[in-house]
Amino acid sequence: MAHLKDIPILMYHHIAAGDAVLPEDNSFLSLNVFVAQTTALSAAGYTTIDFKQLADIYDEKVKPPEKPVIITIDDGYAETLKNVMPVLQKNGQKAVVGLVTGCIGSFDDWQKARKEYYKIIDAGLVREYSKSCFSFVSHSETHSFLSALEGHELEKEVTFSKQDIEKLTGQPVNTLIYPYGDRNARVKEALRAAGYRFGVSISAETKYVLEDPFDLRRVYVKKDDSIRTFMRKISPWYLWYRGFRRR
Ligand SMILES: [Zn+2]
């Protein structure tokens, strides 16, 4: 993997259709914006890949596409996945969904500060969607701050979520997206021990995106980003700059 050092990994949460009034929160994007961004990716020659493919690239089993990009969607919101599926399918793209397995078929009950709760997809849809443009990875079992946990508590968050998704989809799960991007050396070690290949965060602790497989930083796509800003954020120099500044 000598040559590929940086790759944009996009971070999304909620994508709302139609005239839905979006909360102030930057994690809510309108579907129109998502359509424009994914279309721009295609037009610029980007190929979406998943973490299975990233593992093969790491292992030098396959050559990376010329411009790889990973689309991640955190939390597994039912409405969001329903909204983005036809868009991805139309563009021939794929996305990776970080699932909080303890909330499958229920609500995002970790969002204690919010007035409103949002529905997480149910087990049937996980099964069905895993055969389409989505692959599912772990986003822990209860969306806890993993660095605050130890021993069995930490192990449970990491292993149960992996097993649950593997049982549902029949596909191996090699990635965990850290809730709140929260991780430390012990958390990374727990992932390694549980058989993960990748841990996905938000901010940069390494110079290059792919430097530490248990610390893959992401591009935070914000709701007011213009297409120009979006394309700048995923450009090679900007990825390099973030690593250089450790941002
Ligand atoms: Zn989350």
Image (tube, grey):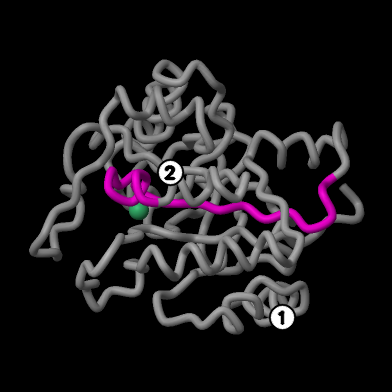
Hey, what amino acid is under mark 2?
A: Gly
Does the magenta-highlighted stretch encompass residue 68?
yes
Q: Residues within 10 Å of mark 2 (few under 14, many from 20)?
A: many
Whether residue 99 appears in magenta in the rendering, the answer is: no
Give how far apart the Cα atoms at labels 2 and 1 are: 27 Å
Tag of residue 150? none
Query: Which residues fall within the magenta stretch?
Result: 64-83
Cβ at disc 2 under 8 Å from ligand 1: yes
Residue named by callout 2:
98
* Location of residue 227 in the rendering, given as x and y in whole percent from the top left corner: 56, 79
Counting from the top left corner in percent of width and height, residue 52 is at: 66, 34
Q: Which residue is mark 1?
A: 241
Q: Residue furthest right?
A: 2
Identify which residue is drawn at 24% across, 78% down: 24
- Residues under numbered marks 2 and 1 in contact, where contact means CB atoms less than 8 Å apart: no
Please state the horizontal and vertical placement of residue 184, each as a whole percent of the image: 50, 54
Callout 1 secondary element: helix
Q: Residue at x 72, y 74 (%)?
A: 235
Residue nearer the viewer, 34 or 174:
34
**Looking at the image, is mark 2 or mark 1 nearer the viewer?**
2
- Any atom of ligand 1 within 8 Å of the CB at mark 1? no
Residue at 47% over, 28% down: 130
